[in-house]
Amino acid sequence: MVADRASFEVQVSKDGRWSTETIVYKEDEARTLAKKLLADKKCEGAKIVRNWLRSDGTMVETEVFCETRAVKDDGPIRITPIDSVPAEKCETPEEFLGPDARGVMNRVFRTYLDKAFLTPTELMHSYKELKRLQEKDSLVPSAVDRVAQLQTKDGEQAPKDRSQEIFKSIDNISARARRVESLKLPKLDGRFSDVIAKLGAMGESEDRDYLAMVVLSRDLINVRNWVGKLERLCALAVEDSDPHAVEMLDGVIADVLGSNVVQDVLGWQPGLGAAIIAMFDLADGKMPPVKSDAGESAEVLNRLFAEKKLPISRNVLLDRAHRQIRSPNPLMRNDTTKEFEEFKRLIGRALCPTGFVCGSETADAVTARYTRMVEQGGAAGRKAAIEGVFRALPDPATGLVYLCELAGSSFAAEHTPDIMETMELVFRCRSISDLCLRTLPPKERMLRATNAHRVAMASVLPPELKTKVADFIDTILERYLIDEQIVEKLDHHDSPLRDRAVRLVQFCAAGVLPEGKAMTRARQRILMLLRQPNFDAHFIDGFTDPMRAQKALRDFHQLLVKAGFG
């Protein structure tokens, strides 16, 4: 019978996510059940999806009923304790609307924002929502007091004075939101940049970008779940080609990523370590979206990160990853015996070709994590953690990168002597095989040693120590060139002059050697070739087309410049 081909799925909304309650085979029965569920004041929403089984075996889904609402909750809501704030204080109301301030709001009001499904942007651009927050228990005064204490703990300003400054800015933000509450503004029906352009043509005295955020906030407030907000924002960012519009959307996507939607985007992970690694992958636009519970939103978000269109959101995501690294939660769920193995996997992912993902911040976070893995406490535990992280890294070259980055972190204030002591383990290396992983190909070994040289030269190490590191790595690389006859193999006498010259110059231009003795040795070999009589004529020997010969010569001279031959 036709009726047998239809079923009705009754779903309920909880914490912004839909889940199936039951499946029935009559629509009136499904509607009765949905109304019964909505009679519960704690129910956030109910909907009915009609599933129709076609004759070819495929299923067609149609939403036939949906009702959502904000659940009233008069229970006490407290601020989330925070222990850090950005170094720069916000002084003007405009700065309080910026990404740093919104990031603090996202953390300190996390419980309230999750219950209301609001971003800080929506909160500050809607007078109604801002007023509701201000009337909720003592949330705002508690948050202001906490932020004021953190911002004045190392300065001369009194916390009370800073609190008064923050309250004054909140009053200004509230008054501004109230002024525009009754303004008739265009709806966000197309591209966000089109709305910005329309607002600019309206001639309103209020700032165009501010009004654009009001329009965006009015649009997002109607979406009462995090995945839905993320989907809406990502779609707007993909559709828009205007850099300024995308930058504004980036700030609000960052707000959304401050919520637990990140768990939906990452999908199920076997433990915290895997989740942190997935966050690093997502920040680089390399996360496989197949595991995600956020559907197409995860794929679009991953694409936007890969295209480097979301720098603000990337910073928020990486900040979240670093907070999780520092947290006391185990990296491996239900199996403490694999904690160290997972830690090594984590720091392996935190490394990139140029060093750690976020330099000193990452070095600081992984060291803080390791302090929980040693028996000692206090200063002795932190010292043991520094050496422990060093030894957990793939080789002394990456260990040197870690120590150079750590020298610029908060650990250095108390543990610079311990960092220097651990660095002596690097200077014990006698060859590139000791310094760099033996299984790496020759080019990768030289790149790794040269990268350690570059990080050291850019670090906050004392000048005399930088010189010592530079000479040490340069000597090892020069010895490697001699022992393995790298230059001689590139300059094989049986090869044509042009091939020999191009190979040698490409080698010098590849960035595999720092400036120093090793590079000088390679360049001297090139100079020997260049000084041969009639070099240019010999170089283009074999070309029958004069145009091709001239192009080959021009390309070679450009390569010479890139390789440092002026």
Image (cartoon, grey):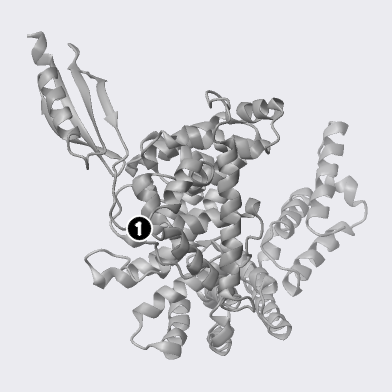
Give the quarter of the image for residue 194.
Answer: top right
Residue 274 or residue 140, whichever sits in front: 140
Q: Is residue 496 above or below residue 322?
A: above
Which quadrant holds the C terminus?
Answer: bottom right
Q: Residue 417's spot in the image, x, y percent? A: 57, 90
Which quadrant holds the N terminus?
Answer: top left
Give the quarter of the image for residue 341.
Answer: bottom left
Name the residue at 42% across, 70% down: 326
Q: Is residue 303 above or below residue 106?
A: above
Which residue of the protein is positioned furthest toward the right in this rendering? 533
Name the residue at 46% across, 83% down: 387
Q: Is residue 24 above or below residue 342?
A: above
Q: Is residue 363 left or right of residue 488?
A: left
Which residue of the protein is positioned furthest toward the top in this rendering? 1
Q: Given the image, on which type of amino acid does mark 1 rest?
A: Ala
What is the tally of numbered marks visible in this picture?
1
Q: Residue 463's spot in the image, x, y percent? A: 73, 82
Which residue of the protein is positioned furthest toward the left in this rendering? 1
Q: Is residue 340 above or below residue 203?
A: below
Name the residue at 32% across, 68% down: 329
Q: Residue 283's spot in the image, x, y percent? A: 49, 51
Residue 33 or residue 556, whichever sits in front: 33
Query: Residue 61, can we see it?
Result: yes
Q: Residues within 10 Å of mark 1 (few under 14, many from 20)?
A: some
Query: Residue 263, can we see it?
Result: no
Residue 222 or residue 182, whichever sits in front: 182
Name the residue at 17% across, 16% down: 53
SS type, badge 1? helix
Q: Name the residue beneath numbered marker 1.
A: 274
